[in-house]
Every structure is written in structure tokens, then in C-alpha cells.
């Protein structure tokens, strides 16, 4: 496969289960639809060292979910202090 | 009938202004009455008396109103320049339906923020520095062990001079209470801090609540992913966002923790579990040690 920009040779890397094509010549990166979102979703879960410990991982291996349709809506009731933290200055 | 308010005369004045704009009678409803701010709704009109000590004399609020009016796809802006009523600054805005706590618009908020941050910076946009609320809240802390934890975390923050300015348009005080739905979609309200500065501060509150374990990781991922996918410039499109989010998130953890300690003290009640989680995060910030 050749780079659509400079016709250089494309190499495939895999990062967190997502395939990334990078041009050896111009270093341009090309992603298929949804791959940026998939990578960003995984990177969002990383946190600085002082952050609260992550919740326990699911029993099954982590899957990358591609959201092509409507966004997933969570229905979590928010109470008391948490409501104020989200809704006021 | 007038609801119970700390500012009855001002309430009647705002209700009168609301009736003039609503072009008809209507029962005035009290939406907000705290810290000197009074917000009254009449039909589809909302009238707000701004905080007395934030009365701007340099015309910056007028400029902010104009900027918001020029971005109707992003803001539910005041209908007219600010009024001056009984020594108070007053704005009149159409009513918008607030976000519901059981269905928070994380994705829609992120897309709207990305659009705001990508908008050209208008001439005359007031410059915004490092948010000043954190220092103000920390200075109001009472004594006690929880307050000490917050004060120690505050000491790890780098000095204000180290905050660079890429100079983008930003909301300046973004949280879920600033999202309303009016007809065709979500809009921002509250333009008092709208200006030019580092847009990463608009992401600081959800980032802080994620690091405290208060905001669910899926909600944070939805928000950050939608922001990046919409081309939001505040964080790099690839790689860890925490190189730029670390200091803003720490700052907001400390600000929120201070606010929790103060309001628990004022109400003479213990901290609830979410509030305690934010104080505990301050403890980890201090233990992580060196200022950035």
C-alpha cells in the first residue's frame, strides 16, 4: 500500500488493538473510520498517578467498541454532593 | 404571589422586566437565589441579577454579550446589552431546558465545546488568565483536618505565571449547569467568564471528577472521545491527554474540595461519600509530591 499523499510506503502498526497505517516517508498517519475514536477511548482511561484507582476491570478481555450509531446513554442517578460538583461553579 | 427570597424588592423589579420582555402577564418563578445572585423566570424569559461584587465597569460584560449573540449556534445569549437596575447588573435571556441529572449530555457538551474552541477569537474578547476561584475558595477554608488536606494540595500547584496562553475562545466556567436545550439543540448559558485563553480549562471539571473516581470512566471517555473526534484543540488528538490536563484537573479537584468543605461546614453536616472522594484525591495529590 502506498501513501495517498506522497506515494511513500505505508507500514502498519498496532496500538492497543487498533491498526494504524504510517507512511515511512512523510510520517503521515492514516486511520480508518472509527479508529481515532477507538484509540481516544482507550487513552481516556489512563489517568495521572494521583488519580483514584480505576474500577476493577471486566472479567472478559477489553474490547474496542466502535460507535457508529447513536451515542450510548448511561442512566446513572446523581445524588447530593455529586450533583453539586457537576452542576455548579 | 412572591416566593420566599432574600431580595424581595429586587425580585419584583426582575419580574417586571421579565413581563415587559415576555409581552404578557405570567407568574414569576424563582430559579436561583444564592451568593447575591437572583434569577427569575417569567414564561420563556429569564432575568438574572448578577453577583454584586462582579459588577464590571470596563464594558467587558457588554463585549461578552455581543460575542455570544454572534454565535447563536453555540450560546443562548442575552437578548440585549446588560441593564443597570437598582445598582445591579441585569441580563435578560430566553429560557432553556436544563440538563437532566439522569441523562447528562456528555457527548453533545463535548462537541459544543470543540466548536467553541475552534471558533475564531473575536476582536475584544476579554483575556482570561489562570482561574482565580481556587485561591479564593482555599482562602475561605475553615480549620480542621479535611481543610488541611486541601491546603497542602493547593501548595503543589505551579505559580500562575507558568500558565501559557494559546489564545482560544473559551466558556471560562463550564459545567453541566451551563448546558440548556432550546428548540433545536444544546446551547451554553452564562457568559460572564467567556473570553480568550487556554481552552483546556473548559475540560478541567469533568477531568477532575474522573480522577476523583466521582465521574464514571465511561462518561469521561464519551466526553473526551467526542471532543477529540470533533477536532477540539485543547488536548492532543493522539496520546495521553494528561500532559495538558494534569494541572487543570488538579486545580479543579482542589477548588471542588474546598467548596465541599466550606458548604459542609456552613450546613453543619458531615461530608458525603462523593465529597470525601474529592478530599481523598487532594491527599494523593500532596503525596505525589513535587509541583509540576
Image (cartoon, coloured by chain):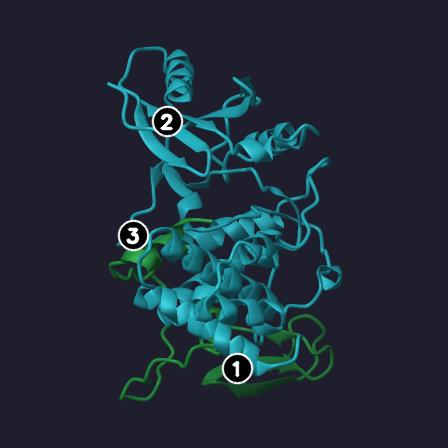
Residue B154 seen in render:
yes
- Residue B93 lies in quadrant: top left
- The C terminus of chain B appears in which quarter of the rendering? bottom right
Residue B219's disc is: none
Residue A49's disc is: 1
State the residue in front, A21 or B44. Answer: B44
- The N terminus of chain B appears in which quarter of the rendering? top left
Q: How far apart are marks 1 and 3 (CA)?
A: 29 Å
- Residue B125 lies in quadrant: top right
Which residue does the image show at 57% across and 56% down from the upper left?
A: B139
Asked if residue B97 is positioned above or below residue B207 in the image, the reply reads: above
Residue that numbered label 3 is attached to: B101
Q: Are marks 2 and 1 on the same chain?
A: no
State the residue in front, B209 or B202. Answer: B209
Tell me the SS state at disc 2: strand
Give how far across and how far down residue B135 sits, in percent.
Answer: 60, 56
Tell me the SS state at disc 1: loop
Asked if residue B94 is positioned above or below residue B107 in the image, the reply reads: above
Which chain does tag 3 point to? B
Give how far across and how far down residue B85 sits, in percent.
Answer: 52, 17
Precedes in sequence: disc 2 or disc 3 = 2
Classify residue A15 as left or right of residue B98.
right
Give how far across and how far down residue B193 sits, in percent.
Answer: 58, 42
Question: Of circles 1 and 3, which is in front?
Answer: 1
Q: How far apart are marks 2 and 3 (CA)?
A: 22 Å
Residue B40's disc is: 2
Tell me the SS state at disc 3: loop
Which residue does the image show at 41% across and 56% down from the upper left?
A: B107
Amino acid at each position: 500500500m502506498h501513501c495517498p499523499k506522497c506515494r511513500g510506503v505505508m507500514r502498519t502498526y498496532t496500538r492497543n488493538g487498533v491498526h494504524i497505517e504510517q507512511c515511512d516517508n512523510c510520517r503521515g498517519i492514516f486511520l480508518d473510520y472509527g479508529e481515532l475514536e477507538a484509540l481516544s477511548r482507550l487513552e481516556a482511561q489512563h489517568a495521572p498517578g494521583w488519580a483514584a484507582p480505576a474500577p476493577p476491570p471486566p472479567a472478559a478481555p477489553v474490547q474496542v467498541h466502535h460507535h457508529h450509531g447513536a451515542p450510548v446513554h448511561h442512566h446513572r442517578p446523581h445524588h447530593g454532593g455529586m450533583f453539586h460538583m457537576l452542576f455548579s461553579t | 404571589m412572591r416566593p420566599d427570597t432574600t431580595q424581595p424588592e429586587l425580585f419584583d423589579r426582575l419580574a417586571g422586566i421579565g413581563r415587559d420582555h415576555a409581552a404578557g402577564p405570567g407568574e414569576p418563578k424563582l430559579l436561583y437565589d444564592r451568593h447575591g445572585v437572583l434569577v427569575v423566570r417569567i414564561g420563556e424569559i429569564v432575568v438574572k441579577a448578577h453577583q454584586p461584587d462582579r459588577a464590571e465597569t470596563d464594558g467587558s460584560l457588554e463585549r461578552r454579550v455581543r460575542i455570544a449573540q454572534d454565535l447563536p449556534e453555540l450560546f443562548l445569549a442575552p437578548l440585549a446589552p446588560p441593564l443597570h437596575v437598582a445598582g445591579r447588573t441585569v441580563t435578560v435571556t430566553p429560557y432553556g431546558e436544563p440538563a437532566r441529572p439522569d441523562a447528562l449530555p456528555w457527548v453533545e457538551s463535548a462537541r459544543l465545546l470543540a466548536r467553541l474552541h475552534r471558533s475564531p477569537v473575536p476582536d475584544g474578547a476579554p483575556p482570561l488568565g489562570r482561574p482565580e476561584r481556587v485561591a479564593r475558595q482555599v482562602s475561605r477554608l475553615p480549620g480542621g483536618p479535611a481543610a488541611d488536606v486541601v491546603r497542602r494540595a493547593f501548595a503543589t500547584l505551579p505559580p500562575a505565571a507558568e500558565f501559557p496562553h494559546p489564545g482560544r475562545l473559551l466558556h471560562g466556567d463550564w459545567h453541566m449547569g451551563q448546558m440548556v436545550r432550546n428548540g433545536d439543540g444544546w446551547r451554553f448559558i452564562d457568559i460572564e467568564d467567556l473570553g480568550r485563553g487556554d481552552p483546556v480549562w473548559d475540560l478541567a471539571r469533568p477531568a477532575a471528577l474522573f480522577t476523583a473516581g466521582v465521574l464514571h470512566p465511561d462518561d469521561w471517555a464519551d466526553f473526551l472521545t467526542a471532543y477529540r473526534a470533533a477536532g477540539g484543540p485543547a488536548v492532543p488528538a493522539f496520546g495521553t491527554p494528561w500532559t495538558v490536563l494534569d494541572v487543570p484537573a488538579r486545580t479543579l479537584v482542589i477548588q471542588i474540595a474546598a467548596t465541599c468543605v466550606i458548604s459542609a461546614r456552613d450546613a453543619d453536616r458531615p461530608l458525603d461519600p462523593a465529597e470525601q472522594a474529592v478530599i481523598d484525591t487532594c491527599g494523593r495529590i500532596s503525596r505525589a509530591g513535587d509541583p509540576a
